[in-house]
Image (cartoon, rainbow, N blue to C red):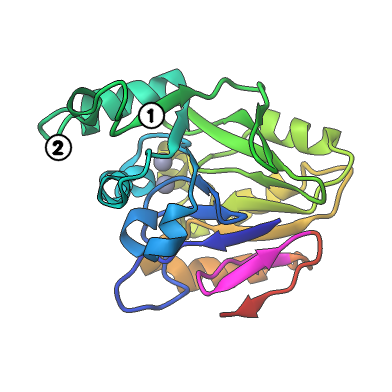
Amino acid sequence: MKIRLIPSNTDGDPEIQFLTSLLVDQSTLFDAGSAGFSCHEVALQKITNIFISHAHLDHVASLPSLLEAYIAFQLPPPMIWGSAETLLNLKELLFNNRLWPDFFELGSPKKPLIRISESVDYRPIPLDGLRVTPIPVSHVITTQGYLVESDSATVMISSDTGPTTAFWEIANQQKRLDAIILEVAFPDSMQTMANAACHLTPKAFGKEVAKLTSHDPQILAVHLKPWLRSKIVQELQDLNLKKLVVARSDCDYQFPDTQIGTN
Ligand SMILES: [Zn+2]
Ligand SMILES: [Zn+2]
């Protein structure tokens, strides 16, 4: 399974991440914060399924641009998966003819501009070569993390979350677990803010990882607030977690064999 963090800043710094998009095996996108702004035309055309964990702007900002690309390519749009609440938020708050044209109304049954499908907690979704199971996590709005399985690897994606439970229970139930992509947003000095926003600090991140009892997977840290990044990285290093990597957008993360190569 190959995972790539899509770049989300204009000066090309692979460490800075304003927006969230993770591309798995070229065809399945987890969140659309930046993919519609950053992906090459060929890469975009390979995306067939998009999972939206929640409707916060850093996870949906490029979705209109991404769907416009498919109109330009004259291709059917990718399937957008989300919880009932997330899909409702997209309809009412984004594609509402105020923030963006209403793609639900503009398309036709034969030529839709947008396609949606509900992703129900704990119900596996079989895709071509992957199986995705949404798991509820603990954020300020309804948010789904994911269990992502292929024939050769199992990876979990936390999306945005504060301290949470079901995600780690599912992790401990797996026969194999190659990697966890785990958020951390604020430094320890901003714990009060992290609590209010339902995000993790490095200290809370360490406590979450300690909930793993049956596996020792690679841990990829994501979602570091750009202007607080150096402090967060320093505090993550102080956790002394041997298999912790702060994710960059110029690497392919390959599982089960983690080979971090710059492209
Ligand atoms: Zn969020
Ligand atoms: Zn976020």
Can you say which quadrant of the picture contains the N terminus?
Answer: bottom right
The residue where tag 2 is placed is 99
| Secondary structure of the residue carrying numbered label 1 | strand
Up-down relation of residue 146 to residue 136 (above or below): below
Region in magenta: 244-255
For the point 32% across and 49% down, the residue is 66
Residue 136 percent location from the top left of the image: 58, 27
Q: Is residue 251 magenta?
A: yes
Work out whether residue 49 or residue 30 is closer to the camera in this orientation and state it. 49
Label 1 Cα crowd, 10 Å radius (few <14 / some 14-19 / many 20+): some
Q: Is residue 18 left or right of residue 151?
A: left
The residue where tag 1 is placed is 115
Q: Is residue 181 left or right of residue 214?
A: left
Q: Earlier in the sequence, mark 1 or mark 2?
A: 2
Residue type for callout 1: Arg
Residue type for callout 2: Leu
Residue 108 percent location from the top left of the image: 25, 23
Disc 1 residue lies near ligand 1 with CB under 8 A: no
Distance CA(mark 1)–CA(mark 2): 19 Å
For the point 32% across and 32% down, the residue is 114
Label 2 Cα crowd, 10 Å radius (few <14 / some 14-19 / many 20+): few
Up-down relation of residue 90 to residue 13 (above or below): above
